[in-house]
Image (cartoon, grey):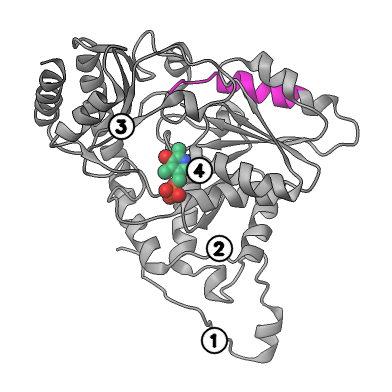
């Protein structure tokens, strides 16, 4: 039977003694809607289980889960390190808000653990990881990166250790177990796979470590980041099919990515399962599946206007943000303007495709008609 949808701001207590003694801080009982209801607690438990973690807190969007983690672990004078291919809005929060609160924001090359090692300082408190990176889909050596941070922490004398946090939206707890790869905290946009419907926004922060969880939980309570019961219900409804959808979209995406790779006008297709795509060997070693994203880098002979026209010409692939919903999406990106550290080796434009649940034949025919117009 599906769990009930409990809606509350107010929770009624039987007497003053109960009102005084029920502790909102550890969610051991229901105290106030903002602190969770049986509906959200059920969802938290399921997301933690799915990811192989122990504790979970929900936030009203993936981005609010990112900023929650930042605010839970960072204080004035601390430093945060982001991969050069980090999710853009998370970067924007760091640049615009964290910096003005006195947090230093730095970047590292996610494909070079030695570069991360060289950039860690005693002030480093939070190291974000993404597998693969947003838009460009390089798959990093996660065990090597988390080991670099562990070795750094072991050498600290009296400083607070650095915490590693993975944006696990792509893996969704299905492609790999983040904690087994050495990650301390796993954040996910439930907006994507767990929801699956492209109709709800939510985020999660999962840990195995109780002390880290408590730090996130207390900050979460102080910020007032509750989620609505109806939204939690939508995600609970998506969860039983998440593995089916993940693997179906994975198979369709790999088929389309391989086909696209062979097309005239396409310089390279980026997808961790394709040999030659950055980090392919790490993906093969550490992951058992891949999400529904691939990016195509076009020949340099096509102008940005032509690439835009190609996107406009597609009929199945619609224009819009997000992914892992039923409808396939695409969007063009200008990569040099979204990274600051590592050189981008391609001159041609990039389009990121998110494969939905339509038939692969229809999607391939759509790409074929778009490419033939581009080449004509
Ligand atoms: C979508 C996304 C987010 C943010 O999720 P929202 O619910 O849209 O705020 C964070 N990280 C990644 C990798 C995403 O794709």
Disc 4, ligand 1: is the CB inside 8 Å?
yes
Residue drawn at x 49%, y 70% is 37
Residue topped by disc 4: 89
Disc 3 versus disc 2: distance between alpha carbons? Answer: 29 Å
Of callouts 4 and 3, the N-terminal one: 4
Disc 2 versus disc 1: distance between alpha carbons? Answer: 21 Å
Q: Which residues lie in the magenta part?
A: 137-151
Q: CB atoms at circles 1 and 4 under 8 Å apart?
A: no
How packed mark 4 is, by other alpha carbons closer than 10 Å (few <14, some 14-19, many 20 or more), is: few
Residue topped by disc 3: 292
Q: Residue furthest right?
A: 157
| Above or below: residue 167 compared with residue 253 | below
Quarter containing ligand 1? top left
Of callouts 3 and 2, the N-terminal one: 2
The chief SS type of the magenta part is: helix
Which secondary structure lies at badge 1?
loop
- Quarter of the view holding residue 113: top right
């Amino acid at each position: 039977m599906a769990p009930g949808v409990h809606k509350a701001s107010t929770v009624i207590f039987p007497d003053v003694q109960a009102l005084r003694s029920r502790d909102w801080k550890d969610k051991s009982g229901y105290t106030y809607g903002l602190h969770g209801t049986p509906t959200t607690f059920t969802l938290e438990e399921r997301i933690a289980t799915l990811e192989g973690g122990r504790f979970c807190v929900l936030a009203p969007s993936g981005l609010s889960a990112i900023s929650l983690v930042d605010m839970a672990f960072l204080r004035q004078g601390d430093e945060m390190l982001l991969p050069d291919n980090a999710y853009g809005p998370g970067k924007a929060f760091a640049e615009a808000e964290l910096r003005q609160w006195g947090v230093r924001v730095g970047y590292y090359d996610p494909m070079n653990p030695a570069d991360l090692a060289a950039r860690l300082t005693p002030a480093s408190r939070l190291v974000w990881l993404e597998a693969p990176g947003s838009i460009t889909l390089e798959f990093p050596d996660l065990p090597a990166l988390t080991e670099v941070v562990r070795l750094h922490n072991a050498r600290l004398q009296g400083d607070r250790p650095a915490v590693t946090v993975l944006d696990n939206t792509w893996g969704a707890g299905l492609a790999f177990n983040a904690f087994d790869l050495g990650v301390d905290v796993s954040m996910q946009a439930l907006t994507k796979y767990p929801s699956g419907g492209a109709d709800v926004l939510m985020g999660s922060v999962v840990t195995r470590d109780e002390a880290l969880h408590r730090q996130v939980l207390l900050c979460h309570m102080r910020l007032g980041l509750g989620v609505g019961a109806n939204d939690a219900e939508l995600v609970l409804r998506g969860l039983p099919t998440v593995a089916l959808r993940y693997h179906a979209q994975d198979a369709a995406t790999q088929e389309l990515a391989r086909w696209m790779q062979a097309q005239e006008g396409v310089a390279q297709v980026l997808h961790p399962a394709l040999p030659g795509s950055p980090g392919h060997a790490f993906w093969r070693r550490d992951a058992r599946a891949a999400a529904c994203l691939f990016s195509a880098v076009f020949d340099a002979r096509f102008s940005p206007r032509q690439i835009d026209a190609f996107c406009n010409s597609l009929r199945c692939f619609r224009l819009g943000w997000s992914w892992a919903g039923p409808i396939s999406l695409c969007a063009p990106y200008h990569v040099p303007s979204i990274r600051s550290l590592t050189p981008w080796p391609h001159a041609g434009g990039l389009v990121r495709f998110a494969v939905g649940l339509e038939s692969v034949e229809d999607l391939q025919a759509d790409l074929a008609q778009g490419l033939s117009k581009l080449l004509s």
